Amino acid sequence: MKKFSVVIAGGGSTFTPGIVMMMLENHERFPMRELVLYDNDEERQAKLGEALEILLKEQAPDLKFSYTTDPEEAFTDKDFCMAHIRVGKYAMREQDEKIPLRHGVIGQETCGPGGIAYGMRSITGMLEIIDHMEKYSPDCWMLNYSNPAAIVAEACRVLRPDAKVLNICDMPVGTLRRMSQIIDKKPEELEVRYFGLNHFGWWTSVKDKEGQEYIDQIREYVAENGYLTQVEVDKQHMDASWQETHKKARDVLAVNPRYLPNTYLKYYLYPDYEVAHSDPDHTRANEVMAGRENEVFTAARTIIEKGTAVDGGFHIDNHASFIVDLARAIAFNTHERMLMIVENNGAIANFPDDAMVEVPCIVGNDGPEPLAQGKIPSFEQALMFQQVTVEKLVVEAYIEGSYQKLWQALTLSKTVPSAQVAKDILDDLIEANKDFWPELQ
Ligand code: NAD
Ligand code: G6P
Ligand code: MN
């Protein structure tokens, strides 16, 4: 079988060890000949790179492994780039969350003003790595899950329309696992219909392969418990704040019981509740820095000190195995059915063609083919149109360097109460992001 050469962009990510171990676990389905980590923060990446080098020598001695900050070294002779960069790292995520909260507005990584601020930073970093990939390995595919995926995907559509970039999110994957627990099935036995934008969508059907529909049974459960289940799906989404999010899906469902909601809709439908239950001095960024980031880098240090990864603290991120499914779909033309973020072009019949939407797709060696989801009701359509316009305005503001358009984007966000609050937040965000954003006029 063919063996693949892979670069992970954002090699210093908290998710890198888990994903590398997941790929090792899946080596029969997705054999690798080379793995390179690439990051623009040499020091951060080296901490994980050195530990992974020890681990890989023990567990996969035939795999050629390296880590580098040199784009040519990283991107030459590659079949796949798994991209999970965070431009501005956790220090800036903290700002994204805390600045809006100071103005009484949702402070979140990908939703509302925080997501907009992050988007304005991510576009630059994403264009950079796409250009490296196209320069050194023009046939390479990028499997991107860098956030905010909706804005990143729109920026790719406009600025790099021919690039082989696939944008994907793990939230629907994780929630489907919860649904499968609710009905006592395996997630791979289920097939869904879904429409929306990234972090902004609804399941309209959850069936098994025989065509048995389970949406009523799942709805009944979610109406009482949200997506809270007792079984550990993955470590990350078990934190107390994530449990609150799974639970809150109950209230999101109550507004619109027809379809099963993505958990992120709570930020748009219950912003007042979310703000009231946020601590402006301690947000999710603080939790992750003290939690996942600390654990991963402590484990790396221990592996390096001991000189062995046997009984080491890196854990397999099994829930990320959809990345291997996606790579296999491209590499082996498997026609896997997956939710992807793609240009609408009629998949949602009554929604603009040029919107980046999240819908089920059949993925083969030419990329994703969206499956038609038909017409959507006006409640969801109106919410989506408002949100997609925010995302488009952010990309336009980035390209044109337009203060006005970014102000409009913030004003239009359902999370922001007025143009004045939008302006106050924007002015603070500009100050905090001056090392990252293009200059706005
Ligand atoms: P992290 O800060 O730990 O890691 C990101 C790494 O990217 C850092 O080491 C940083 O130095 C590096 N980086 C930043 N800009 C870069 C650039 N221009 N070139 C190369 N490297 C660069 O972050 P994390 O929490 O591990 O998350 C990584 C990313 O994955 C984030 O964007 C996060 O939102 C995303 N994510 C997405 C999903 C999804 O569903 N789509 C799921 C989980 C995480
Ligand atoms: C989910 C989303 C990702 C997001 C992550 C944040 O997995 O799909 O897009 O980045 O949650 O999780 P965290 O643990 O970093 O708050
Ligand atoms: Mn996501």
Image (cartoon, rainbow, N blue to C red):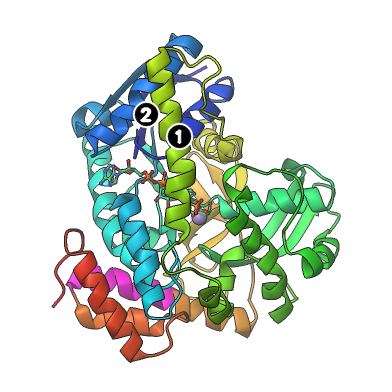
Task: Estimate the x, y position of residue 365 in percent, counting from the top left.
Answer: 49, 38
Task: Estimate the x, y position of residue 85 in percent, counting from the top left.
Answer: 35, 46
Q: Is residue 276 left or right of residue 206?
A: left
At 22% from the left and 64% from the top, the residue drawn is: 433
Label disc, if present, on residue 48 of the rendered structure: 2
Report helix, strand or loop for mark 2: helix
In the picture, which quadrant includes the C terminus?
bottom left
Task: Estimate the x, y position of residue 131 in percent, counting from the top left.
Answer: 23, 45
Q: In the rendered structure, which amino acid carries the disc numbered 2?
A: Leu
Rendered position, 72 above or below 361 = above
Report helix, strand or loop for mark 1: helix
Boundaries of the magenta span: 388-401
At 47% from the left and 81% from the top, the residue drawn is: 414
The reply to whether residue 307 is in sight is yes
The dominant secondary structure in magenta is: helix
At 22% from the left and 26% from the top, the residue drawn is: 73
At 64% from the left and 62% from the top, the residue drawn is: 244
Query: Disc 1, disc 2: CB below 8 Å?
Result: yes
Q: Is residue 402 left or right of residue 57?
A: left
Rendered position, 245 above or below 312 = below
The reply to whether residue 38 is in sight is no
